[in-house]
Image (tube, grey):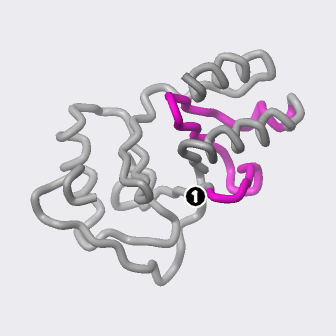
Amino acid sequence: MSSLVSPRPVTWQERPVPLSPSAVVGLGAVASALLRRVNQCTADELASLEAVAAPGVFLVLGEEERLPWVNGVSYLGCDPRAPALLLPTTLAPSVHPSLLEQVIRRRLATSQRVAVVLEPPRLISLGGPRPLTVQGLTTLKARVNS
């Protein structure tokens, strides 16, 4: 993570109290599995979720109890000290979250929210998550698998 964010190494420690999950992300084969799981949702279930898709990446945003699960996903949540970041729910950065947020947003030159994935290290801009619909899943599948 340090090479993506800052010359100062950022390490991650277990959080004493995990963040509440507000997103779930899959990369590579896990992204495809997560997309297949979401494809099994009803239209009503989809209506409460939003998604961001890119080649090899599928991220779903929603209320904790509505987030899907497949083996290998990472859950992300919002630390109130860095509201523009989605961070791992069980790990905290060694630097103050607001500083991490400033550095990441400056580095990516974005005002959008950003998801921080640790394995493998990746920053995902959430520039415009889209509401999930049955019809929209085809487009998302094409993005994930391209």
The x and y percentages for residue 83 are: 39, 51
Depth check: 113 or 10 in front?
Answer: 10
Q: Residue at x 62, y 44 (%)?
A: 29
Image-quadrant location for residue 135: top right
Write the start and end of the magenta stretch as one range. Answer: 44-72
**Mark 1 residue crowding within 10 angstroms, few (<14) / some (14–19) / many (20+):** many
State the quadrant of the C terminus: top right
Relative to 5, is 96 above or below?
below
Relative to 13, is 22 above or below?
above
State the quadrant of the N terminus: bottom left
Q: Residue at x 52, y 79 (%)?
A: 17
The x and y percentages for residue 112 are: 36, 33
The residue pinned by badge 1 equals: 75
Q: Is residue 83 magenta?
A: no
Q: Residue at x 39, y 35 (%)?
A: 125
The number of numbered discs placed on residues in the rendered structure image is: 1
The x and y percentages for residue 128 are: 48, 25
Q: Is residue 69 magenta?
A: yes
Image-quadrant location for residue 61: top right
Residue type at the position of mark 1: Tyr
Depth check: 82 or 56 in front?
Answer: 56
Image-quadrant location for residue 20: bottom right
Relative to 145, is 66 above or below?
below
